[in-house]
Image: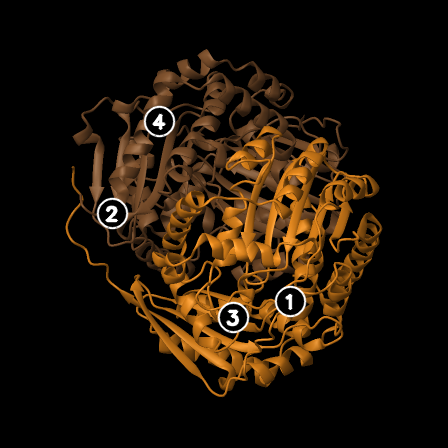
Chain colours: A brown, B orange
């Protein structure tokens, strides 16, 4: 493969074409239930439905000494639950999901935990899949034996991860860039060992409430069927929760001398891994579009980005080099990175730094701006051309509290971005003397 | 839990849906051949106004010779370095200008290039792709920079990745003669000694319309697509392809072992048995289907046999996976790989795997286990249609292995006829020590040389 695209969590959204080429399908707001919000896009072409429940219960709510708790709370929901007809063992849950031809998956990010269901849309199959997911979501059992087993597995995986350069780099970079914000803490063998079944039950009780949930549905169901799905999913969920202590603010990365921002980690690997970045913006920030367009030019546009051109195409220094904004609901970060042969780390870091510095200082060329807009606008349909991508988009709009017409105006907002806006936004939010830098595995340092 | 009766009913209904899916697919898919030998397959899917365009060359690392391993993949990189009309770097810029996504990939069996675009931009990317089928023209300086990038790619994917190192040694040990013994990215030493002329020779040998299949899926009209493809790809001239020597792997005559030392925390184990593949023209051979189903019985869902016994009950491994792909150009392996649980040894894991396999060989599998797997295969067929890119991938990779896209439906139907006895029989016949290669990753502490610090 010529280049592995880095995960870019920019949550882009817009016009919904699915189901009828060229027609724009609306996001429908469904009835609220148990304090949860719910949204639907009807796509009838395939007999299937995708459902996502976003829960405001991500890693940032981990207690400082129990990092990994949020992740385990969600991850263990499919290992035993109390259904309407009694306890479902982990084996029964797995077998029934398989028998239904459904997929049910769980994932946890910094902000939210996500439960995803993919089912054939035929009512009997769909109903059973939803009932099963509802039991997992509302009444996980957290059997102590299974908790112990999964803790051991997590610890072993962590120990393995600690031998991998990319993991060690990322963990150190997060610690650097998040400062006092809870996402600076990553799970350790010690923090996982400290988690008890009672912690899991308590975390679930505290955070898995209707008013912290959003249901997004895409597929072959109508409005009333979608409302039934929402009610069935959330039937046993309590509606509101005790107030949850507010998280600290994510503070802007401070201006610091280089010696305090830059960290070198010795590591016995053939390649050096480099990360650079700082805190940035939330998805709802009005400067989001200038930053999106600008970053396409800087390091988001694959083979045509400046970083790719300077680091890879002109100098052959790295296979992969990238930059991105990861905008969250309340805040976010900017990150750039590359990997290179360990004896050329300082050259690669210099090229990366000067490329980013020059872009912040001077902004893009007019021709670059036009090319970026052309790509983003012409390529817009590719962001929403199947149910899976649509679900990502609907869920992101809902999670980030964006207007439901976000889709209709997306390409217009890209079109309206000016050179001056890009330069101003980059200068407003990024600054080289605030960038945290982590270099792992460099030789001759 | 569902009753058996209900399960059978589900299966029946799923079958009904499935048949509908088959007929819809077949009538939407069209195949053509240009006079220069290029094959074109178009699948119309009008769900969204986008299209996937791919060209597949039947030339992968299995066509390489010793000393030049990795050249198929090197050429993949060089294909972006310019033609007479489109200078280096311009290809990507032009695809980006029309909002396209693009990339390429090389495997043991083939090399493929793709773009995804909004439907009105299809002609632009066909024009670009057809141009570089015949007119690639890169200079030595471009080659010298790009080979550095490829060595970085190898460092990233393999040298610093213990699982990849283990897999590389496994393949090189399991095969004595088959070119499958070489990694697709090539041995580092071969990359260091690669010349621009090696890549050019490769291009001249294999990149020809009569060695290519173009697959286009999405919101298109097949007849109009044919017109565009004839207009641009029709200009390429066919030429004789190099003779492919059979390079048949000799039968294995006993167990082989290899050990790999690499920085890691847990030991890893890979057990690979030589297994038959599906042969074109012999679609009724039940064994490859039975092996596919055996894979799923062992590892097809969360409560499948190996995960249930090894991870959840015995807690001897942290993770376990099973792999087998019944279609490919070269010889197949049935592969079980595992990472050890804390405090457990490779010998303990191997004993547990062998026990699970012996149990299956002696007692067979349940009808209900097989039904569960078959239901999953059917539902996945419907889910697969959500992605036009995925559909193009399936068509292209099937064609490259020497089958027709039309065979896919037949293979799926055939899969549904396989019995528990047939699954048990292939386990007994093929999961035997004579054809087994065992690779073990022996974890080494990294040479830690100090603490992190400031500059």
Q: Is residue A286 above or below residue B175?
A: above
Residue at 35 percent across and 58 percent down: it is: B159
Whether labels 2 and 3 belong to a single chain: the reply is: no
* Host chain of mark 4: A
Distance CA(mark 4)–CA(mark 1) = 47 Å
Single out the mark in the foreground, 2 or 1. 2
Q: Earlier in the sequence, mark 1 or mark 3?
A: 3
Q: Is residue B294 above or below residue B79?
A: below
* Host chain of mark 1: B
Residue at 65 percent across and 63 percent down: it is: B241
Please state if A47 lies on the left or on the right of A162 as rendered: right
Crowding near the residue tagged with mark 1, few <14, some 14–19, many ≥20 C-alpha atoms within 10 Å: many
Please state if A171 lies on the left or on the right of B432 as rendered: left
* Along the line of sight, the residue nearer the viewer: A407 or B146: B146
Look at mark 2 in the image and give the residue it sits on: A343
Distance CA(mark 2)–CA(mark 3) = 33 Å
Please state if A332 lies on the left or on the right of B14 as rendered: left
Q: Is residue A80 something one can see in this rendering?
A: no
* Host chain of mark 3: B
Distance CA(mark 3)–CA(mark 4) = 44 Å
Single out the mark in the foreground, 3 or 4. 3
* Along the line of sight, the residue nearer the viewer: A160 or B106: B106
Look at mark 4 in the image and give the residue it sits on: A356
Q: Please tell me in which quadrant of the rendered image residue A97 appears.
A: bottom right
Q: Secondary structure at mark 3?
A: helix
Q: Secondary structure at mark 2?
A: helix
Single out the mark in the foreground, 1 or 3. 3
Crowding near the residue tagged with mark 4, few <14, some 14–19, many ≥20 C-alpha atoms within 10 Å: many
Disc assigned to residue B327: 1
Disc assigned to residue B179: 3
């Amino acid at each position: 493969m010529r280049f592995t695209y880095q995960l870019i969590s920019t949550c882009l959204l817009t016009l919904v074409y699915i189901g009828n080429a060229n027609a724009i399908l609306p996001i429908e707001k469904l009835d609220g239930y148990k304090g949860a919000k719910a949204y639907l896009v009807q796509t009838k072409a395939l007999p299937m439905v995708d459902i996502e429940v976003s829960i405001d219960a991500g890693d940032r709510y981990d207690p400082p000494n129990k990092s990994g708790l949020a992740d385990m709370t969600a991850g263990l929901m499919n290992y035993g639950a109390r259904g309407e007809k009694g306890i479902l063992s982990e084996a029964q849950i797995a077998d029934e999901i398989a028998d239904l031809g459904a997929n049910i998956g769980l994932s946890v990010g910094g902000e939210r935990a996500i439960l995803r269901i993919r089912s054939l849309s035929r009512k009997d199959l769909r109903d059973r899949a939803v009932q099963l997911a509802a039991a997992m979501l509302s009444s996980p059992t957290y059997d102590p034996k299974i908790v112990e087993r999964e803790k051991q597995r997590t610890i072993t995986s962590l120990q393995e991860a600690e031998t991998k350069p990319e993991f060690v780099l990322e963990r150190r970079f997060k610690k650097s860039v998040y400062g006092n914000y809870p996402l600076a803490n990553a799970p350790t063998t010690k923090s996982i060992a400290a988690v008890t079944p009672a912690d899991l039950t308590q975390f679930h009780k505290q955070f898995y409430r209707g008013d912290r949930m959003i249901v997004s549905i895409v597929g072959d169901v109508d409005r009333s069927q979608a409302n039934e799905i929402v009610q069935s999913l959330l039937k046993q969920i309590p509606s509101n929760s005790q107030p949850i202590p507010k998280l600290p603010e994510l503070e802007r990365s401070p201006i610091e001398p280089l010696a305090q921002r830059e960290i070198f980690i010795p590591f016995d690997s053939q390649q050096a891994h480099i990360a650079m970045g700082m805190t940035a913006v939330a998805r709802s920030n009005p400067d989001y579009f200038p930053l999106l367009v600008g970053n396409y030019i800087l390091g988001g546009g694959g083979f045509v980005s400046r970083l790719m051109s300077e680091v890879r195409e002109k100098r052959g220094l790295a296979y992969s080099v990238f930059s991105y904004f990861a905008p969250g609901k309340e805040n976010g970060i900017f990150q750039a990175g590359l990997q290179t042969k360990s004896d050329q780390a300082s050259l690669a870091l210099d090229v990366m730094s000067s490329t980013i510095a020059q872009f912040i200082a001077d902004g893009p060329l007019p021709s670059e701006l036009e090319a970026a807009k052309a790509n983003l606008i012409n390529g817009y349909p590719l962001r929403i051309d199947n149910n899976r991508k649509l679900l990502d988009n609907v869920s992101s709009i809902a999670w980030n509290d964006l207007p439901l017409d976000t889709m209709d105006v997306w390409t217009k907002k890209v079109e309206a971005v000016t050179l001056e806006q890009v330069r101003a936004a980059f200068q407003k939010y990024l600054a080289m003397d605030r960038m945290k830098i982590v270099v792992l595995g460099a030789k001759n340092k | 839990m569902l009753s058996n009766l209900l399960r059978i009913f589900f299966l029946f209904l799923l079958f009904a849906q499935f048949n509908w899916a088959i007929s819809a697919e077949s009538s939407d898919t069209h195949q053509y051949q240009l006079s220069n030998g290029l094959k074109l397959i178009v699948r119309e899917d009008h769900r969204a106004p986008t299209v996937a365009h791919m060209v597949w060359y039947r030339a992968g690392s299995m066509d390489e010779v010793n000393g030049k391993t990795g050249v198929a993949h090197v050429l993949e990189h060089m294909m972006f370095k310019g033609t007479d009309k489109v200078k280096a770097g311009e290809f990507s810029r032009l695809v980006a200008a029309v909002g396209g996504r693009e990339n390429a990939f090389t495997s043991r069996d083939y090399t493929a290039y793709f773009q995804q675009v909004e439907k009105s931009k299809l002609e632009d990317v066909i024009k670009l792709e057809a141009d570089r089928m015949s007119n690639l023209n890169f200079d030595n300086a471009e080659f010298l920079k790009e080979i550095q990038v490829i060595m970085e790619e190898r460092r990233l994917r393999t040298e610093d990745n213990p699982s990849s190192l283990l897999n590389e040694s496994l393949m090189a040990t399991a095969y004595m003669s088959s070119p499958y013994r070489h990694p697709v990215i090539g041995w580092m030493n071969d990359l260091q000694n690669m010349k621009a002329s090696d890549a050019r020779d490769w291009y001249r040998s294999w990149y020809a319309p009569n060695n290519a299949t173009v697959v286009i899926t999405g919101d298109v009209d097949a007849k109009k697509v044919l017109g565009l493809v004839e207009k641009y790809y029709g200009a390429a001239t066919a030429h004789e392809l190099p003779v492919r020597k059979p390079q048949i792997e000799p039968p294995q005559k006993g167990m082989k072992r290899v050990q790999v030392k690499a920085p890691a925390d847990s030991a890893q184990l890979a057990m690979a048995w030589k297994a038959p593949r599906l042969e074109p023209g012999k679609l009724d051979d039940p064994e490859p289907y039975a092996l596919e189903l055996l894979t799923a019985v062992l590892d097809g869902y969360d409560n499948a046999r190996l995960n249930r016994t090894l991870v959840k009950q015995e807690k001897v491994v942290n993770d376990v996976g099973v792999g087998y792909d019944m279609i490919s150009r070269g010889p197949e392996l049935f592969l079980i790989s595992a990472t050890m649980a804390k405090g457990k040894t490779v010998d303990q894991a191997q004993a547990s795997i062998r026990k699970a396999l012996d149990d299956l060989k002696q007692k067979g599998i349940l009808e209900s286990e097989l039904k569960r797997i078959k239901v999953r295969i059917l539902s996945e067929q419907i889910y697969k249609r959500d992605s036009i890119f995925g559909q193009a991938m399936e068509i292209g990779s099937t064609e490259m292995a020497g089958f027709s896209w039309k065979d896919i439906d037949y293979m799926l139907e055939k899969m549904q006829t396989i019995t528990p006895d047939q699954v048990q029989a292939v386990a007994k016949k093929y999961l035997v020590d004579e054809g087994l290669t065992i690779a073990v990753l022996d974890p080494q502490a990294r040479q830690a040389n100090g603490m992190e610090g400031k500059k």
